[in-house]
Amino acid sequence: MATAPRRQTVPAGDPDAEHRRHVVSALVIDRPGTLNRVSGLLRARSFNIESLTVGTTHEPGRSRMTIVVRGDEGHLRQVLAQLERLIEVLEVGDLHGTPHLEIELALVELDPPADRGAEADLRATLASAGGELLPTTDGTWRARLTAAPETIDRALEALGAQGLRRLVRAGAVAMTTTTTTDPTTSENGASRA
Amino acid sequence: MTALRLPDTDAAAAPQRTVAPRIGARAVCEALVREGVTTVFGYPGGTLLPIYDVLREFPLRHILVRHEQGGAHAADGFSRATGGVGVAMATSGPGAINLVTGLATAMMDSVPMVAITANVPRALLGKDAFQETDIIGIALPITKFATVVMNPDEVPLAVAEAFEIARSGRPGPVLLDFPKDVLQEETTAPHPEPYELRLPGLLRPTRGDVPEAEELAELIAKAERPLILAGHGIQIANATGLLRQVAEKAEIPVAHTLLGIGNMDETHRLSAGYAGMHGWMHVNKAIQQSDLLIGIGCRYDDRITGKTSTFAPNATIVHVDVDRSEIGKNVRTDLGIVADAGDLLAALLPRLPQSEPRAEWLAQIAEWRVVSEARSWHGSGAWRQGRLSADYVVDRIGEATNHAATLVSDVGQNQMWAARYFGFRKPFHHLSSGGLGTMGYAVPAAMGAALGAPERETWAVVGDGGFQMTMQELATLVQDQIPVRIAVLNNHRLGMIRQWQEIIYDENYHSAELFGPDLVRLCEAYGIPAWRATKPDEVDGVIAEARKAPGPALIDFHLDEAQNVYPMMLPGKGLSDMVEGASE
């Protein structure tokens, strides 16, 4: 694993700093307590978790967490450093400014469209967010959306007026799309054993 | 040629070889012995009994504490006095929960320690069994690592890893929870070799040269009023000698944080003194006037900085710490370097040009020092009028022990008096709960310190409030004849509470008066020699008597009046805004 510069400069904290959405990607050890430890640290630092997903990776015993939080840059930077020092965390980074894929899955339940026109509109909305109607036997309309979270946001806004009954979102999963600078690589003057 | 394959994931699991079968409890004890543990502070209980059943077979001295909190603080004191890893043991449920104050204390002050708890058998976990508690859930935020060991085959590896985690990088407490049947079942798992540990997530500082020291050396060469703020990390890194050499070569005065006390002999010409909320005025002035502030192994915590926006306004701020997450956490940082304090100082030393004496800067600090010591020396100054004051007591203990004793302070005014007036000369001699501020720390921690460093005299300096929080350990001191001398600075009140109420809450005293037992008669009941002193001229005599006692001893110093610790930085204020208090 690359050893990043251990020299740093940190300006004074700005209490009015903008609270931006951050996508944090962490490679963690898959064992009981890891999720608890990571989410507990975010809670202790007053971060509200917008979404958190965790799943296995191609490496046995390793899981990838994608955590979406809102907060200012300085605060988040410090929390990432605190996450990094957890024994259960192998790599962690903010994906802001790094090319990455971000996809979310949502399941929706809808009122059946009233007529042909409404159905065409509904299908168009679903299509805009990688949607697909799921087969049902009870006449209920259900669909899945698979797209970037903001695309799903837009589709849901439209669906609100198109008979949206229920919604379940999975939370974003993200993956870097560059191999040269991997932001999930540890950026500090320390190496892992 | 076959490449050496090191296990690179935890999934690689335990070594393949086997040893003769023994139960998990024996494997735990063997592992402790392998880690060099000699002393364990514990309290038995139903689920922990498998360990007590085999404990006698191992060269482990068990100290039966009277409350698990005492055991945790004793393990902490043992660690701090020796630089090793103290061990505390507790049973499931209430026993384990009683450890938490000690774990949090150790966590805040980066003290390596291993806590071993037992839990209900695996089949009962999560079923609200008798004395069951989710101690891992409780311990997670107050430990460096906490885990439950669910398989007897994992015992040797888990204990070895716990010690490695506790002492590596920035040290901290680790808790291992063993379900009872894991301690009772047999395993053939061997103890791992160091390279067999599975710790891919453990941050280890990059060791060796620190090229960034070059930039720091340049800053030092350009600075006119440099100051080092030396923290606990320097002692953890065993680098106090290097600190002195750097300070001498570059002619830089050194200020200490509370836990940095002992980094430098206080009589050294470059030792400025203790900084912060109740630090010396001249040291705080030096911080505010410095043009280069070099924090090494410290946290720039709020008791040092006060209002951060007014902290060290004229300085380029440098922060060296082994923990990256500390850098920039509290103050703006112009140059942050992630490194072990010892490595940084070793890298810095050859890169520094031999400095000319910084006559003007040192003379300025010396001038402030005269004023500062004249004003705040001896707090109320009451001893000069024949009335007993706390600063005098601490000063006389320092003198009597030739400043070579381990001094363990509690929390509150006594802590500040000890820090200011004992006169520390060496590292690992000043123990105090700096970060968490745990009242009740002193007596049990002194117990651990006395056992860890028996070659030194050990004193606990404690207020009557903190003493009453953990005084049950008097029985432990007697049972094991642990030679701790306890100086109770008894003002029959919660002194720091009273001080805040006087200054900040408009003299609205509530719960500041504190009833306590007759401490001399209490000690009589325990069989501990004890003395009472009420006048300054009695102080030297009772200290001399207490020093002669072969085991524990106690002196009840009845302080004459309500004394405050000055100077004081009020909440929300900065270092330039200290309250001086009444001078004589």
Image (tube, coloured by chain):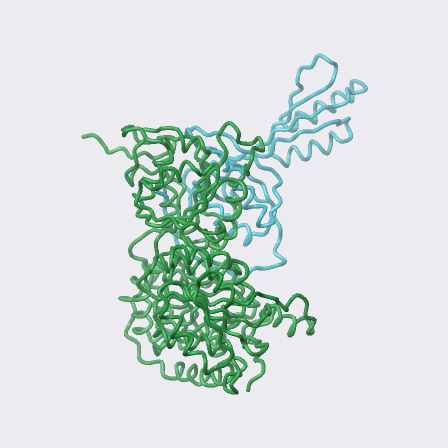
The residue closer to the viewer here, A175 or B503, is B503
Which chain is green in the picture? B
The N terminus of chain A, quarter of image: top left
The C terminus of chain A, quarter of image: top left
Q: Check the image and name the residue furthest to the left.
A: B1
Measured as percent of width and height from the top left, residue B383 is found at 50, 83
Q: Check the image and name the residue furthest to the right.
A: A114
Measured as percent of width and height from the top left, residue B443 is found at 46, 61
Measured as percent of width and height from the top left, residue B530 is found at 45, 69
The residue closer to the viewer here, B40 or B113, is B40
Q: Let me know if residue A105 appears in the view.
A: yes
Marks counted in the figure total 0
The residue closer to the viewer here, B60 or B127, is B60
Res B31 quadrant in image? top left
Which chain is cyan in the picture? A
- Up-down: is B359 above or below B16? below
